[in-house]
Amino acid sequence: MGIEKHFSDCLSERADEANRVLKKYLPSEEGYASRVAEAINYSVTSPGKRLRPILMKETYKMYGGKDQIIEPFMAAMEMIHNYSLVHDDLPAMDNDEYRRGRKTTHAVYGAGMATLAGDGLLNLAFETALSAIDLAPDKALRIIRAARILGEKSGIHGMLGGQAADVDAEDRNRIIDENELQYIHENKTAALLEASLMIGAVLADTPEEEITKLEKIGSAVGVAFQIRDDILDVTGDEKILGKHVGSDAENQKSTYVTLHGLEQSQIDVETLSEKAIKLMGSLSQKNEFLDELIEYLINRVK
């Protein structure tokens, strides 16, 4: 119990740091665009563990990074993650009224303003990330490469591509096969985890071999994370999760659990967990908290 509490305290401290960083880059709520700024800030400052910026910062530290160029990318990553959530919750998508225990952005501001808030967050993310050049002009090439990774992993060849395949399957009301589901999980969920680890390493000027391993770790963790999410939608507690349970079944949505069953899904989570942990052990540098965080992501209960 003592070890678990120590990790929980460390995670909370790092989440607080990520929140402080994020708030530095949020828009002011003034002028004719004040309403969309308010919607942006509402969505981004909702309760969350800030796992992706934490992963990024811990990887950066692990490879010797010490300056502040990581901070704009931490904020940018959280902006992109939250833009995707705002759009996911829209009536035209998952039509969710609650997230993280409170009303979703469209439930408070309306679908039109929520759509614009998501758009605004996506644009603001790249404006924020590239502001790192102002902090360290001599590291511009690293920063540009990191921004490119952010764009690729969040765009049509990453998260957006996975979301599009998911929506397409729902729109056509068809059962998806194993390959398509794997594509959705690897892109919709894993891509931003891959990007978080890779960007931390790129900004710290890490060797290519290590960056490749980190991408594979992000992939294994991301797919396991999504399978766990599918499991929790069947077995989870709404009070713990802070969102509605059973929506996948209600929407007749194909998930890892519907294709493989609960028992096999649990086994596959364990297999992916072992793969990620083995890869972590092969890295040239070590970060005990990062190891614990990877295990936490895979074995979470909320």
Image (cartoon, rainbow, N blue to C red):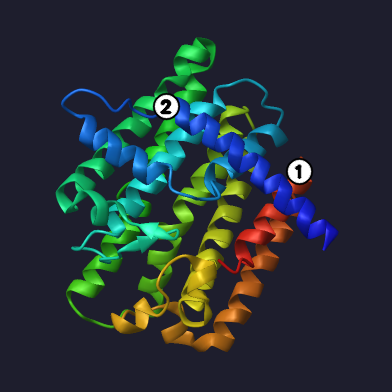
Up/down of 206 relative to 237, above or below: above
Point out the tag, 2 or 1, that comes first from the N-terminus. 2
Q: Which sits in the foreground, 30 or 287?
A: 30
Q: Which residue is mark 2?
A: 25
Type of the residue with mark 1: Asn
Please identify the quadrant where the C terminus is shown: bottom right
Q: How many marks?
A: 2
Circle 2 Cα neighbour tier, 10 Å, few/some/many (<14 / 14–19 / ≥20): some
Q: CA distance from mark 2 to mark 1?
A: 28 Å
In the visual, does 294 lie left or right of 97?
right
Residue 147 point in image, percent of width and height: 42, 31
The type of residue carrying mark 2 is Tyr
Q: Is 181 situated left or right of 10 in this image?
A: left
Q: Nearer the viewer, residue 73 or 138?
A: 73
- Find disc 1 in the rendering and name its residue: 287
Residue 180 location, x and y as percent?
A: 35, 72
Crowding near pointer 1: few (<14 within 10 Å), some, many (20+)? Answer: some
Q: Quadrant of the N terminus?
A: bottom right
Label 1: which secondary element: loop
Badges 2 and 1: C-beta atoms under 8 Å apart?
Answer: no
Q: Is residue 282 above or below residue 93?
A: above
Instruction: Look at 40% across and 26% down and name the residue there.
Output: 128
Q: Position of residue 47 (x, y in %)?
A: 48, 50
Give the side of residue 194 with respect to residue 114, left or right.
Answer: right
* Residue 231 in view, yes or no: yes
